[in-house]
Amino acid sequence: MSEYESVVRAARAEDLARIVELVQEHVAYEKSHPRAPGLAARLGAALFEDGARVWVLLAETPRGEVVGYAACSEEFSFWDGRHYLHMDCLYLAEGARGHGLGAALMDAVTDLARERGFGHVEWQTPDWNEGAIRFYDRLGAAGRPKQRYSLAVRPPANG
């Protein structure tokens, strides 16, 4: 059995610390700013409470080492009038890349979408991440150019 033979499974509560480690690696890889303290508590609530609509699939080596993840949630397309699966993140630790785990994660993501009755999956990747773009192109995914924005919402002023 190859060290990186594809093993993908749903995240469990006991995986939370490793998921947070991988998220921190992913944030650094994408040269983003560090996240606010308390990420584990926020993710735990979103992932493992009853009725959660957020799912994480983990890539795991046969030895049980979690080396990557795909994080997904339900979204709604107003133009299509339908829900779809939004893959917010797909990340593999550096040493786990190039061994088929990304494809295994994407297969698991599409299986999740099918199981939940979603007609398609959407995601984005930074325009500088040429390796990811080549990977998604090889899968037959269609890219759509758009600029992604974020606007912080501040609490109302006391007054």
Image (cartoon, rainbow, N blue to C red):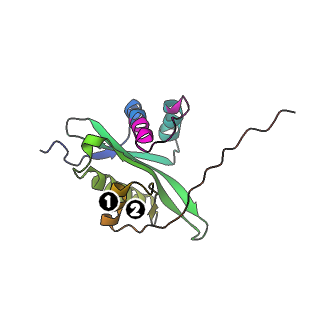
Q: Which mark is residue 52?
A: none
Image coordinates for residue 80, horizontal then vertical, percent: 57, 71
Q: Quadrant of the C terminus?
A: top right
Q: Which residue is mark 2?
A: 114
Q: Quadrant of the N terminus?
A: top left
Q: Secondary structure at mark 1?
A: helix
- Kindly identify the residue that appears in the image at 72 percent across and 40 percent down: 154
- Kindly identify the residue that appears in the image at 23 percent across and 53 percent down: 100
Of callouts 2 and 1, which one flags the residue occurring earlier in the amino acid sequence? 2
- Residue 123 drawn above or below residue 80: above
> Where, by quadrant of the figure, is residue 28 drawn?
top left
Image coordinates for residue 136, horizontal then vertical, percent: 35, 61
Q: Which residue is mark 1?
A: 135
Which residue is farthest right? Answer: 159
Instruction: Tell whether position 25 is magenta.
Output: yes
> Where, by quadrant of the figure, is residue 130 drawn?
bottom left
Which residue is farthest front? Answer: 128
Compare residues 28 and 153 and report the one nearer the observer: 28
Q: Nearer the viewer, mark 2 or mark 1?
A: 1
- Residue 32 drawn above or below residue 15: below
